[in-house]
Structures are given as structure tokens and as C-alpha cells.
């Protein structure tokens, strides 16, 4: 079974702090994704990566950056957290980019005060 | 950009009733996927549809992909309390190569 893990289930940070969210997958998947989930808005793609050191912007990349130094690890960085970044953050991975199942991690609920 | 609209946003049913959620895209899709998220959980893949007019069944769940590949539906027959959760459609296509665009989801509540 594919396992996608995220570093924290719950996180509370203050406005202006730099925040790192870590995601690790154990199935040697090429592709990894970061989404945020807000009520009534579904899942919105922030960034994705199709290879080590490669990244592509999703639909809402503003205020975020990502890092993929190793195939199994994909990090989401909030350079200066703001209250409107309070959300559930979900990481996912897939073997193929466009026609494959995405496997999701358990999510990190981030609160920015 | 590509938009995927899903209705209804909420649905309350009595156990045993049927349930349907609909998904409409602003552009033609290459494929559509359906996910289920249990309360407090994460989205879990249910199925993928690729062909125009395709219909797939999983026990009490029936998935359809429209002829024009711009809409899809999920129908659950005789709902059970275990069906509770949020159902998302997600599509790829057009200029959104490599990206799944998710609908807003339908939150299903099943009353025993």
C-alpha cells in the first residue's frame, strides 16, 4: 500500500512566521502535489512536482513555495504566514501525472494567529 | 482556466434512499476521477473514467462520464450510513496538463 505521511496533523503559528510542511511518500512516485482544502471550495492545487528539483505552479501559488530535493520528499513553505493561510493542507503523490490515482496524506490543519 | 462545478453542495438522505452528485466542467476533460473523503479523513480514490459515455459500477455506486466528456455523475443506490462523507470529482484536460481540477465536493449525510 502507498503511504503518504505528513509531518504534523495540527500546527499553530503566528502571523509572519516561516512555516514548513513536510510530506514523504514511500512508493517511489514521480509526482507529488500540495493542495489546500477549505469549506465550499474543494481542493485547490498550490504546487506540484513531476521530478526531483522540478516544480510547477498550481492554481493558487501566491504566498507559497516548495522544495523537492529528494524523490520521496516534497516540502511546502509559507515564507511569511498570514491568517488567510489558515487551512487544511493535503499532500498527494501519483505514479503517472495525468491518468493516475492520487494518494493523499492525512493532512495538516494549520492555524495562523 | 478550467473549472469544475459540482452540485449539490450538501445532501441529506434517509438510509435506503438514493443519492446523486453531478459534476460539470467548463472544458472537455481527458478523464475524470472520483474521490471519497470520510469525516476527519483524507480523500481516497474511487474510480477513473476515460471514455466518452463510459459507465462503471462498484457495488451500489454507478459512475457515468458524459458523451461530450464535460460532465459526470455518481449515483449511490440505497444509501447506508457508511456512505457518509464528501464526494469529489476531479478532472484533467485542456491547458491544465498534469493538474487535477477538483470540484467543490458534495457532503452526504445519511440519517439512520
Image: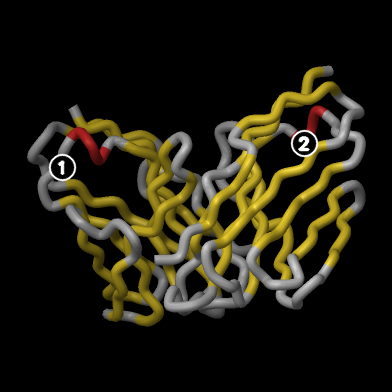
Please tell me whether residue A27 is drawn above or below residue B112 in the rendered image.
below
**Residue appearing at x 84%, y 43% in the figure:** B76
**Residue appearing at x 62%, y 42% in the figure:** B7
Picture disc at residue B83: 2
**Residue appearing at x 30%, y 80% in the figure:** A54
Quadrant that contains the C terminus of chain A: top left
Please tell me whether residue A83 is drawn above or below residue A92 in the rendered image.
above
Label 1: chain letter:
A
Q: Secondary structure at mark 1?
A: loop
Marks 1 and 2, how far apart in space?
36 Å
Q: Nearer the viewer, residue B70 or B21?
A: B70
Relative side of B55 to B22, left or right: right
Label 1: which residue?
A81
Please tell me whether residue B85 is drawn above or below residue A98 in the rendered image.
above
Label 2: chain letter:
B
Quadrant that contains the N terminus of chain A: bottom right
Q: Nearer the viewer, residue A3 or B7?
A: B7
Amino acid at each position: 500500500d502507498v503511504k503518504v505521511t505528513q509531518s504534523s496533523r495540527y500546527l499553530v503559528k503566528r502571523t509572519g512566521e516561516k512555516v514548513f510542511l513536510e510530506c514523504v511518500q514511500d512508493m517511489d512516485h514521480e509526482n507529488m502535489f500540495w493542495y489546500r482544502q477549505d469549506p465550499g471550495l474543494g481542493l485547490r492545487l498550490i504546487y506540484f512536482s513531476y521530478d526531483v528539483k522540478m516544480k510547477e505552479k498550481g492554481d493558487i501559488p501566491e504566498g507559497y513555495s516548495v522544495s523537492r530535493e529528494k524523490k520521496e520528499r516534497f516540502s511546502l513553505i509559507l515564507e511569511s504566514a498570514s491568517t488567510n493561510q489558515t487551512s487544511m493542507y493535503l499532500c498527494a503523490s501519483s505514479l503517472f501525472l495525468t491518468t493516475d490515482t492520487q494518494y493523499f496524506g492525512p493532512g495538516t490543519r494549520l492555524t495562523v494567529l | 482556466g478550467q473549472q469544475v462545478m459540482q452540485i449539490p453542495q450538501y445532501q441529506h438522505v434517509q438510509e435506503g434512499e438514493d443519492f446523486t452528485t453531478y459534476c460539470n466542467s467548463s472544458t472537455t476533460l481527458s478523464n475524470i476521477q472520483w474521490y471519497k473523503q470520510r469525516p476527519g479523513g483524507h480523500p481516497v480514490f474511487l474510480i477513473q473514467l476515460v471514455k466518452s459515455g463510459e459507465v462503471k459500477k462498484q457495488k451500489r455506486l454507478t459512475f457515468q462520464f458524459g458523451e461530450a466528456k464535460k460532465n459526470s455523475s455518481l449515483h449511490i443506490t440505497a444509501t447506508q450510513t457508511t456512505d457518509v462523507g464528501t464526494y469529489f470529482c476531479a478532472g484533467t484536460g485542456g491547458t491544465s496538463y498534469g493538474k487535477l481540477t477538483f470540484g467543490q465536493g458534495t457532503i452526504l449525510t445519511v440519517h439512520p
